Amino acid sequence: MAIEIERKFLLSNDSWREQADAGVFYSQGYLISDPLSSVRVRLAGDKAWLNIKKVKSTIRRLEYEYPIPVEDACELLHELCAERRIDKTRYHVSHAGHLWEVDVFEGANSGLVVAEIELNDEQEVFENPSWLGEEVSDDPRYYNMNLANTPYTQW
């Protein structure tokens, strides 16, 4: 069973950019989603995946991910996900032995920037970077599948 344990935070400032990589543009769309599960297609640079998630708790999810051809992902995004899609640039930032993913959203979610950290277990201790703000792991509005349905700019 594939488990994802992830915590999500808003950012207090842009100083994370000093340590970030060049970033990769992501486009992802939702074929199916409800409050607890989703099936999505994701295009990131020259790679693509089909992903299935099921919420188990606010920070724990079952997650299954399968590579698919980029051409298939483009067609799925265009034909089946046009109305339920998000675009963002994802940056990686290393801090105190952990890898952070910082997502800068575009389009209808423009203005939203979140940082995520994947953990090995729910009690894992990590050091908060100085640029980290409020934790929003327990706020479902920040789930990507919900941002595809109710964008940040519509809150």
Image: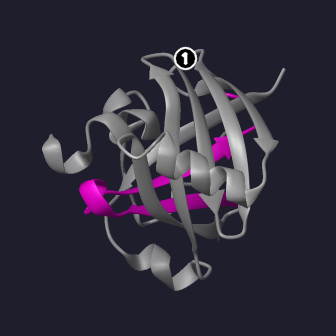
Residue at numbered disc 1:
57
Q: Residue at x 50, y 84 (%)?
A: 18
Magenta residues: mostly which secondary structure? strand
Work out whether residue 51 can be spotted: yes
Dividing the picture into quarters, in which one does residue 13 lie? Answer: bottom left
Give the camera-side residue of 114 and 133.
114
| Quarter of the picture holding the C terminus | top left
Q: In the image, is residue 19 above or below residue 139? A: below
**Image quadrant containing the N terminus:** top right
Q: Is residue 74 left or right of residue 62?
A: left
Q: Is residue 108 magenta?
A: yes
- In the rendering, at what x and y percent does residue 88 appear? 45, 62
Q: Element under label 1?
A: loop
| Membership of 113 in magenta stretch | yes
For the point 55% across and 17% down, the residue is 57
The amino acid type of the residue labelled 1 equals: Ser
Residue sitting at x 70%, y 40%: 50
* Left or right of 140, for residue 88: right
Q: What is the magenta range? A: 98-122
Image point 72% across, 47% down: which residue? 49
What is the basis of the colouring in this image? one colour
